[in-house]
Image: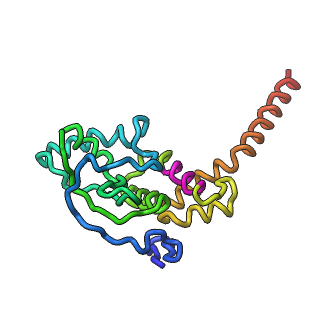
Amino acid sequence: MYINPKDGSGVNRSLNLLAKLQPGELRSIPMDNLIQDPDNPGWNKKSLRRFVQSEKIGEAFEMFNGTVIVPIVVAKHESKKNTYYLIDGHGRVAEASDRGFEEIDARVLEFLDPLQRIVLRESLNNGQTSIDPTVQLADVFLVAKKMNKDVRDAEDVEEILAVFPPTLRNAARKKLKLLRDWPANREAAFRRRRKIGRNCLQQD
């Protein structure tokens, strides 16, 4: 088990869905052979991540003379030969497509099931500044659905979050607690407002 020297948190190897992940190979692949992962909520027109990163990615292309310095990450499709799920690099692919690229450099991994793709995607994104927390939560909800778990159940939440990196796990845990407590918090706030209203009437 990896232990973070800063706070003692760690990655439990027995729960690590990526424990057997191989580095794959680096090669150039045709843009037309990429497909969007149906379970990826991050790269859509309403994504804050897309809005913020698009300009920066365009600038990077200009600085590097149209070269993709950091390869995208893809995983082989389970049945279609020479077809790849795009896991990381949606911005680079979009920019390359706009510039008319026919191929792009990629790290090609073997097939990963949907849960593994979600965990890998969030593990890669977790090293970046979190600018779209709703996307992270969307992935947590996807994992919960695939595991048949309830995000409103405290015990289920711990099983769901166990597959994610510790830092993401801690941030998501706080958000899910707020969600879990929301009905009770709303009722408590309503009771406070009602009590304040009665006090105001009595004073009048």
Residue farthest to the top, as pictured: 204
Residue 153, magenta (yes or no):
no
Dominant secondary structure, magenta: helix
| Left or right position of 62 against 170 | left
* Outermost residue toward the bottom in this view: 1
Residue at the spot x=35%, y=52% of the render? 86
- Seen in the picture, residue 140 relative to 96 is either above or below; the reply is below
What percent of the width, then of the height, locates residue 156?
Answer: 66, 61
Q: Which quadrant is the C terminus positioned in?
A: top right
What residue is drawn where x is 68% and y is 50%?
Answer: 180
Q: Nearer the viewer, residue 91 or 29?
A: 29
Q: Nearer the viewer, residue 198 or 42?
A: 42
**Residue at the right extreme?**
202
Query: Residue 115 location, x and y as percent?
Result: 50, 60
Location of residue 88 in the rendering, given as x and y in whole percent from the top left corner: 34, 54
Q: Is residue 137 magenta?
A: yes
Q: Is residue 105 left or right of residue 48?
A: left
Magenta-tinted stretch: 136-145
Residue 78 image-quadrant placement: bottom left
Q: Residue at x 18, y 39 (%)?
A: 100
Indicate the position of residue 82 as horizontal and vertical percent values: 29, 57
Which residue is drawn at the image coordinates 24% and 41% (left, top)?
A: 95
As drawn, is 112 to the left or to the right of 66? right
